[in-house]
Image (tube, helix red, strand yellow):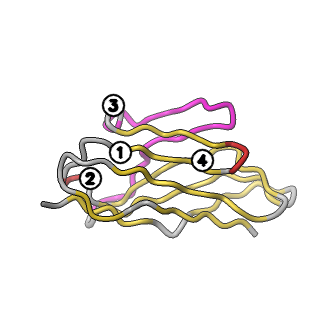
Amino acid sequence: QVQLVESGGGLVQPGGSLRLSCQASGTDFLAYEMSWHRQAPGKQREMIASISRSDTTNYTDSFKGRFAISRDLPADTIYLQMNSLEPEDTAVYYCHADLIHGGRMGDAWGQGTQVTVSS
């Protein structure tokens, strides 16, 4: 079994910054690509960025600049640095991993962490 756990969300004022973390844990797995997504109230879930084991990153265009994804490969942890946050960034932020687990391909989602940007 593989579990993804996000942390670092919370309440922040407009213009502030947050750094989210997501750690994958379990046995007999390889997370070959991990990514961050978010879902705002009443909107579809959207991908922010992904990162491979070689640190190749892909960003949805609207998130380039303010958001940055990174990875601590030995710890199976990814991060999302978010700067210049605005109320429109309020959403539940989710971690996702494409996995090889027990010899099979699969995926996993974290439970999400709430980010609220408000004055």
Q: CA distance from mark 2 to mark 4?
A: 21 Å
Q: Residue at x 68, y 31 (%)?
A: 54
Could you tell which of marks 1 and 2 lies nearer the N-terminus?
1
Say which quarter of the image contains residue 71. top right
Q: Are marks 4 and 1 in contact (CB under 8 Å)?
A: no
Residue 87, horizontal then vertical, whole percent: 18, 55
- Please say if 46 is above or below 43: above
**Magenta stretch?**
43-63
Q: Residue at x 80, y 58 (%)?
A: 101
Q: Amino acid at mark 2?
A: Asp
User: Of tags 4 and 3, which is closer to the observer?
Assistant: 3
Number of residues whose C-alpha sits closer than 10 Å to that of mark 4, classed few (under 14), some (14–19) or many (20 or more): many
Q: Amino acid at mark 3?
A: Gly
Q: CA distance from mark 4 to mark 3?
A: 19 Å
Residue that mark 4 sits on: 34
Residue 84 painted magenta? no
Could you tell which of marks 4 and 1 lies nearer the N-terminus?
4
Q: Secondary structure at mark 2?
A: helix
Could you tell which of marks 3 and 1 lies nearer the N-terminus?
3
Residue that mark 3 sits on: 65
Q: CA distance from mark 3 to mark 2?
A: 14 Å
Indicate left or right for 85 with 60 as reference: left
Say which quarter of the image contains residue 65. top left
Q: CA distance from mark 1 to mark 2?
A: 9 Å
Residue that mark 2 sits on: 89
